Amino acid sequence: MAGTVPAGGCCRKYSSAGGCGRNYPAETKEIKDSETQEKAQRRMKSVRRICFRLLILAFFISGALMLMYPHLHSLYAEFCNRKEIDMIERRKKRIEEQEPEDSAEKRYLQLYEDMKTYNEEIFRSGQSGLADAWSLTQPPFQLSDYDAPEEAVGYLFIETMDVELPLYLGASEENLSRGAAVLGQTSMPIGGENSNCVIAAHRGWKGIPMFRDIELLCPGDKVTLANLWETLEYRVVKCIVITPDDMDAVKIVEGADMVTLVTCHPYTQNYQRYVVYCRREQAEQDSGDEKSGGNDADDLLIPYEGVEYEPSGDEIRREQLINYAGIALFAGVCAVLAAALMKKIFSKGGKDGEKRKNRQRKKRRKRRKHRDGIKKS
């Protein structure tokens, strides 16, 4: 019969005869709307997935930067220190090559003479204005007053500690954050009889070792001090710990040519001061002393015993171990993430899985169309 509809629903040939009465344009529109909604949902899921991955990546990068910051800052500081030290070496070479009549040579000679006069004056006055390194006293000299382009007056090299630091005048906060600094009311770093150049530095600063490993120094170890004119060699003769207000312990010893290193103690704290006395190597040879630095000679030169203290070696090693463990953990996480990424990129199973998902989506769309058609019929 013309009006009979076959079992299982209607078909197009009956709709053309008006037997079914289905509205195909409306059905097509609903299917398109459904597909549009499905695409929008997929886009939202994709956006959420991307945002989640970016959030994880941001956390990962932040943690990595926090972990690597001390090491990166140490490398940057080493680069800056190297530039400053190279500038000092070039200046020293130019001073040696210039004629005495040269104006630049005269300025540096005047600076040297003024420092020498200053050293004599503070010895005669008994260093009445001497204060703790962290009291931030004003430096007695400004290199800019002599038209000197350098900011540092020299540098300090200690092989036992594996440190090389630029040396600045005045223990200001800025100078101590960049390297070592000459304490005010102590001798300028040019050597000479009746002099004691007291050099202060932090016990580590934002990943930069500085004087962190000062407890490694022992009597007989070499300390090299290079200024704008020459390089001076010193030998460690004694190491003690004092209180911050015991400034008599770092005053000039009559007849001696010394350098004294000062830093905070214990490590990460500052209620004591670790002090290392060094005597000019040339002065020892001239006086017939040997390098050994025996107790009798040391006590004669340095009449201070200091106070009792706790060594900081264990705490320093513990901190280094934690840093190394953190770096190893970071490297392991990077390796795992890299392996997972490579597997996802090159794995055939990943591609097959994506194809299966596409086929399943197509089947779902067909079933949805079929169900919608039955309901409307």
Image: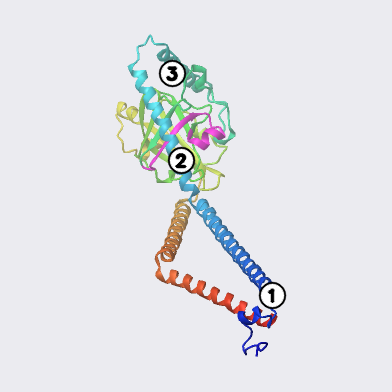
Please name whichever residue, 333 or 214, is drawn nearer the observer in this view of the structure.
Answer: 333
Element class at badge 1:
loop
Amino acid at the residue labelled 1:
Asn
Amino acid at the residue labelled 2:
Tyr
Element class at badge 3:
helix
Residue 253 visible, this orientation? no
Please name whichever residue, 141 or 299, is drawn nearer the observer in this view of the structure.
Answer: 141
To which residue does mark 2 refer? Answer: 76
Q: Give the vertical position of 27 relative to 9 (above or below).
A: above
Identify the residue at horizontal 47%, vertical 20% (top origin). 148
Q: Quadrant of the N terminus?
A: bottom right
To which residue does mark 1 refer? Answer: 23
Residue 365 visible, this orientation? yes
User: Percent position (x, y) of residue 102?
Assistant: 39, 11
Determine crowd level at label 1: few under 14, some 14-19, many 20+ residues with C-alpha closer than 10 A.
few
Please name whichever residue, 64 or 145, is drawn nearer the observer in this view of the structure.
Answer: 64
To which residue does mark 3 refer? Answer: 112
Q: Quadrant of residue 302?
A: top left
Tag 1 near tag 2, CB within 8 Å? no
**Whole-Å distance between the Cαs marked 1 and 2?**
74 Å
Q: Give the vertical position of 81 relative to 102 (above or below).
A: below
**Whole-Å distance between the Cαs marked 2 and 3?**
32 Å
Task: Identify the magenta region.
Answer: 160-180
